[in-house]
Amino acid sequence: DVIDVRPLTGKGLFTYDPGFVSTAACESQITYIDGDKGILLHRGYPIDQLAEKSDYLEVCYLLLNGELPDAEQKKAFVNTISNHTMVHEQLISFYKGFRRDAHPMAIMCGVVGALSAFYHDSLDINNAHHREVCAYRLIAKMPTLAAMCYKYSIGQPFMFPRNDRGYAENFLRMMFSTPCSDYEVSPVLVRAMDRIFTLHADHEQNASTSTVRLAGSSGANPFACIAAGIAALWGPAHGGANEAVLTMLEEIGDESNIPEFIQRAKDPNDPFRLMGFGHRVYRNFDPRSRVMKKTCDEVLAELGISDPLLKIASRLEEIALEDPYFVERKLYPNVDFYSGIILKAMGIPTSMFTVIFAMSRTIGWISHWNEFHSSPNRIGRPRQLYTGAKKRDYPG
Ligand code: ACO
C-alpha cells in the first residue's frame, strides 16, 4: 500500500524511517524491482532478457529514452557515444597530481567531478539538449577515465579510445594494450564485460542513485552529481562489495575454513558479514546473480582457468543456502558475488572492480538525474528526529 504524504506536509506530520526502508522519495518510470519474487525490469524489460538479447549501449538508450532504439537510432547513438570518448588533454595533469598508489575510486571521484570544469557549454540543467549532451559525455568518457586510472597506477602510457571498436572492447583495449602491443580481445570476454556493464546499469533508488538525485535536486551540475554517486558507491556495503568478496574469498583460502567464516558471519558480536550476500530489497535470488554465474562459467571455460576461489565461492554458496541463519533472513548471493571472479579471471586488478561498477552505473545515475529534471521537482530535504540536548544557557 502506498500512503502519499504530500497533502499532509506542512501540517506537522512526518515519518521516521532510518535507512529509508519503507519511504519512497520519488516517482520513477525507469526500473521496477520486486524483491520478494526476484524480479528486475528496466522500462518493463526483464534483466535476464536484456542481458541475453541486448547489449550495454542499447540498454543505455533504453534507460535514458524509455524505449529500445530501432536500428537507425541505435547506429546514431553508438556513433554519438564513440565521438565523445576522448577526454581533454589537460586532464592528464590532474591525474599526475595523484599518488601512483591512490585507490582508483579516489581518482575517479576527482576526475569525474573535474569534468564540470571543461564543459561549460552544456551545464544548463533546465535545457533538455544540454542534459542529453552531458549524458552522452559521461557514458562515453567513463571507460576512458577508468582505464586511465589503471594505466596511471602501473606507470604505463594512457591508451586512446578507438572509435571503430565497441564499448566493452574499447575499454578492455585501453586497459591492456600498450603502444608496443595491441591487446587481442576474445569475443567471449567482450561479451562478458558487456554483460557486467548491463547487469549493473541501474537498480532504482539505491544509496548512490539516491545520492545523485539528492545532489541533483539542489541544481548541482551533472558531473558533480555523478562524482557524488561514485563516492557513495565506494563503500563496502554497496559497490565496494565486489572488491570485498574477492578479499574475503582469498582470506578464506581453503574450503575447510568456510565453516569458521560462516560462524563469524552469524555471530552478532562480530562485525564480519559474508560479502556478496544479502540485499536490502531482494529477499530472494538476485536475478542478476544467476546471469553473472553463467557468465562466470563461460569466461573460466574460455580462459581455461580452474580458479580455486570459484570452488570456495560455490561451496560457500551451498553451505550458506542450507544454513537456517541465512535461510530465515533470506540472504542470497547478490550481483557482486560472482562479478569479482570474472573480473579477476580477465586480469583486472581488484582495486578496479568498483570503478567498473561506477562506469556501468553511470547510465542509471544520469537517467535518474535526467528524469528528476524532466518533471516538476523540488530540492530534497530529509528531516530528522532530534535526540540531542534540550535548550540550555551558555555558562557564565
Ligand atoms: N552476512 C551475515 N549476516 C547478514 C548479512 C551478511 N552478508 N547481510 C545481512 N545480514 C543479517 C544482519 O546481521 C541482520 O541480522 P539480525 O536480523 O540478526 O540483526 C539481518 O541479516 C538483516 O540485515 P540488515 O543489515 O538489516 O540488512 P540491510 O538491508 O540493512 O543490509 C546489505 C543490506 C548492506 C546489502 C547487507 O546484506 C550486507 O552488508 N551485505 C554484505 C555486503 C554486500 O554484499 N553488499 C552489496 C549489496 S548489493 C549492491 O550494492 C550491488
Image (cartoon, rainbow, N blue to C red):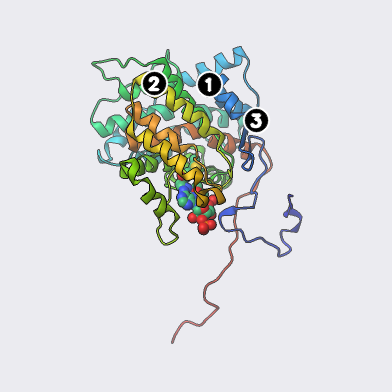
Element assignment for label 3: loop
Front-lying residue, 231 or 88: 231
Residue occupying the point 61% across, 42% down: 35
Residue 235, above or below 133? below
* Residue at numbered disc 1: 55
Rendering coords of residue 101 (x, y %): 25, 40
Mark nearest the camera among 2 and 3 is 2
Give the amino acid at mark 3.
Arg
Rendering coords of residue 380 (x, y %): 60, 51
Report whether 359 appears left or right of 24. left
Element assignment for label 2: helix
Label 2 and label 3: CA atoms lie apart by 33 Å
Residue occupying the point 65% across, 24% down: 67
Element assignment for label 1: loop
- Give yes or no for contact between labels 1 and 2 (Cβ–Cβ under 8 Å): no
Give the amino acid at mark 1.
Asp
Report whether 235 appears left or right of 45. left
Label 1 and label 2: CA atoms lie apart by 22 Å
* Residue at numbered disc 3: 43
Disc 2 or 3, which lies upstream in sequence?
3
Residue 286 location, quadrant: top right
The answer to whether residue 201 is visible is no
Give the amino acid at mark 2.
Ala
Residue 62 location, quadrant: top right
Rendering coords of residue 180 (x, y %): 23, 16
* Callout 2: CB less than 8 Å from ligand 1: no
Residue occupying the point 25% across, 38% down: 100
Neighbor class of circle 1 (other Cα within 10 Å; few <14, some 14-19, many 20+) is some
* Residue at numbered disc 2: 301
The label on residue 294 is none
Disc 1 or 3, which lies upstream in sequence?
3
